[in-house]
Amino acid sequence: CFLFFKQKKSFPIFYTSALIFAFLFFIVLESFAENFAFHKEEIFTNEELIKALRFLVEILLIVPYLYLSKRAKETFIQP
């Protein structure tokens, strides 16, 4: 939040890292842990697949925008 409001140049890197970490940890690893602990038949339920698709859409839309957009490059300029 601090990096965004201060328009720091490092914001896109940290935001991208946070999105990827959240996707891997909260969606994928949580599903495998539940499968291991509760011996579920399916690793990914429909609800978990919808969550994963939402994360992937967000990653696929926002990350390229932060790196390729002229407006984003002009916004995040503070060292």
Image (cartoon, grey):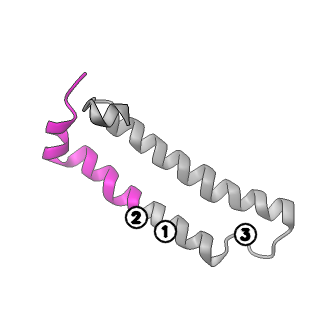
Residue 8 drawn at (x, y percent):
28, 29
Horizontally, residue 18 falls left or right of residue 30, namely: left
State if disc 2 and disc 1 touch (CB < 8 Å).
yes
Give the Cα separation between the discs numbered 2 and 3: 21 Å
Residue 19 on the magenta segment: no
Residue placed under numbered mark 2 in the picture = 57
Residue placed under numbered mark 1 in the picture = 53
Give the Cα separation between the discs numbered 1 and 2: 6 Å
Residue 69 drawn at (x, y percent):
18, 48
Q: Which residues are magenta?
A: 57-79
Quadrant in which the C terminus is drawn? top left
Residue 33 drawn at (x, y percent):
77, 56
Residue 38 drawn at (x, y percent):
85, 65
- How crowded pointer 1 is (Cα within 10 Å; few <14, some 14-19, many 20+) is rated as few
Question: From the viewer's perspective, is residue 44 above or below residue 33?
Answer: below
Looking at the image, which residue is at 33% across and 30% down?
10
Label drawn at residue 19: none
Tell me which corner region of the image, top left, top right, bottom left or bottom right, holds residue 39: bottom right
Question: From the viewer's perspective, is residue 8 above or below residue 25?
Answer: above
Tell me which corner region of the image, top left, top right, bottom left or bottom right, holds residue 4: top left
Of the two numbered discs 2 and 3 on the same chain, state the one appearing first in sequence.
3
Quadrant in which the N terminus is drawn? top left
Label drawn at residue 43: 3
Give the Cα separation between the discs numbered 3 and 1: 15 Å
- How crowded pointer 3 is (Cα within 10 Å; few <14, some 14-19, many 20+) is rated as some
Q: Amino acid at mark 3?
A: Ile
Q: Amino acid at mark 2?
A: Val
